Image: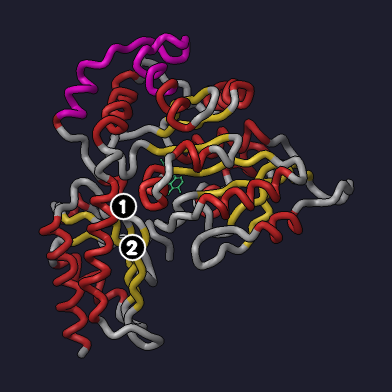
């Protein structure tokens, strides 16, 4: 069962405000809504929307790239990147658990005739540079053509250090591959690693960043890269039905998020650390609980056979969580300290029932 089929319930069903399923569940604050209402707009397909143009320029600047394209979602941004780097019969080397390979319906294969070579990821979520080099196909008509290395950061909350990303990127470029970085939560990675998003983006030719996760915008992602690749991405966005019109309304939410919601991301990481700390008293080990935390995410695996009971216990208390066999508990701007305490106590109470 994956994350989505294993959600405890929906907010509509329970009216719950203790929603730990994802950082995508945040609602725009009144300041963001005011910025959206007041946004200058135009037809973006005609290149006329001043607020979308401003957001794209700002993201390109932050990420150290020549150009950027605003898209409705992270999935479409990754797909546009794949279609812009690769042609039919070409191949992407990617981590087996990475979103582009595992959770985007193999869109690149379905729509672009692009293959995948999926490699194992280590405990920290990273790829092994030697495995990347070994996965590059020889120049042989029996094989697909290796064209792109797809990296991700953060990976299920885990921030991959810059030197490891650089080693992976170097392994790819030794064989003439381009590099795409799925940085849906790149600002979380940068906050955790103490570097800038530009430092991390520098390893890649193109990078996806989502505004609709920890940054709190209602929708939108940005793909940034060199001018030629972004021109192709803009064509591919239209091809995919992602050419939008007066999107200044949502681009304004993205600009508001960059101005107000980046500096607060470490608060989400601290809330996740506090929850993990509360749960450190649980008996951990082979037959016990397993708790891990990275950036804004906490993964809690109850003792074997207890997942369904635990999910029901949380749902009864109005707490929403997702994932099986591990519950994924995600901190975000609409979760306050009291909510973290309520969740921690609910998990400790459940553990008591097993004692
Ligand atoms: C790492 C990563 N990449 C891409 C996406 C896709 O973003 P979206 O849900 O906007 O399509 C997600 C969504 O959770 C993600 O976690």
Q: Which quadrant of the figure has residue 204?
A: top right
* Precedes in sequence: disc 2 or disc 1: 1
Q: Are marks 2 and 1 in contact (CB under 8 Å)?
A: yes
Pointer 2 residue: 328
Dot label at residue 22: 1
- Give the vertical position of 342 relative to 231 (above or below): below
Q: Quadrant of ligand 1?
A: top left
Which image quadrant: the C terminus? bottom left
Query: In the visual, does 251 lie left or right of 348?
Result: right
Query: Does the magenta segment cover residue 40?
Result: yes
- Give the vertical position of 249 relative to 196 (above or below): above
Q: Residue furthest bottom?
A: 355
Viewer-closest of 22 and 123 = 123
Which image quadrant: the N terminus? bottom left
The x and y percentages for residue 96 are 58, 59
Distance from the alpha carbon under mark 2 to that under mark 1: 8 Å
Looking at the image, what colour scheme do you see? secondary structure
Secondary element under disc 2, as helix, strand or loop, is strand
The x and y percentages for residue 202 are 55, 38
Label 2: how many residues lie within 10 Å, few (<14), some (14-19) or many (20+)?
many
Q: Which quadrant of the figure has residue 350?
A: bottom left
Q: Residue drawn at (13%, 65%), measured in percent from left and top?
A: 342
Q: Residue furthest left?
A: 338
The x and y percentages for residue 170 are 68, 47
Query: Does the magenta segment cover residue 351?
Result: no
**Magenta extent:** 31-56
Q: Residue drawn at (62%, 26%), measured in percent from left and top?
A: 229
The x and y percentages for residue 269 are 29, 55
- Give the vertical position of 336 relative to 204 (above or below): below
Q: Residue drawn at (49%, 63%), measured in percent from left and top?
A: 124
């Amino acid at each position: 069962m994956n994350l989505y089929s294993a959600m405890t319930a929906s907010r509509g069903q329970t009216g719950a405000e203790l929603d730990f399923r994802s950082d995508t569940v945040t609602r725009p604050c009144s300041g963001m809504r005011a910025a959206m209402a007041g946004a200058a707009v135009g037809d973006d397909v005609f290149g006329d929307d001043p607020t979308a143009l401003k957001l794209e320029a700002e993201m390109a600047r932050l990420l150290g790239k020549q150009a950027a394209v605003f898209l409705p979602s992270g999935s479409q941004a990754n797909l546009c990147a794949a279609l812009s780097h690769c042609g039919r019969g070409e191949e992407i080397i990617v981590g087996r658990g990475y979103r582009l390979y595992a959770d985007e319906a193999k869109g690149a294969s379905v729509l672009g005739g692009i293959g995948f070579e999926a490699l194992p990821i280590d405990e920290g979520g990273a790829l092994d540079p030697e495995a990347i080099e070994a996965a590059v196909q020889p120049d042989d008509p029996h094989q697909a053509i290796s064209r792109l290395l797809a990296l991700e950061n953060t990976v299920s909350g885990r921030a991959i250090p810059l030197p490891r990303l650089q080693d992976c990127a170097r392994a790819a470029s030794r064989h003439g591959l381009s590099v795409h970085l799925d940085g849906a939560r790149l600002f979380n990675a940068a906050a955790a690693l103490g570097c800038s998003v530009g430092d991390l983006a520098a390893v890649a030719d193109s990078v996806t960043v989502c505004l609709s996760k920890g940054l709190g915008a209602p929708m939108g992602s940005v793909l940034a890269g060199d001018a030629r690749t972004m021109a192709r991405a803009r064509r591919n966005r239209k091809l995919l039905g992602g050419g939008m019109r007066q999107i200044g309304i949502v681009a304004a939410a993205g600009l508001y998020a960059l101005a107000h919601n980046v500096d607060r991301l470490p608060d989400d990481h601290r809330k996740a650390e506090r929850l993990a700390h509360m749960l450190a008293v649980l008996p951990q080990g082979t037959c016990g609980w397993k708790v891990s935390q990275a950036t804004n995410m906490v993964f809690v695996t109850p003792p074997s056979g207890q997942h369904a009971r635990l999910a029901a216990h949380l749902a009864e208390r109005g707490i929403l969580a997702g994932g099986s066999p591990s519950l994924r508990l995600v901190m975000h701007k609409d979760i306050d300290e009291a909510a973290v305490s309520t969740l921690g106590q609910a998990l400790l109470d459940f553990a008591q029932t097993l004692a």
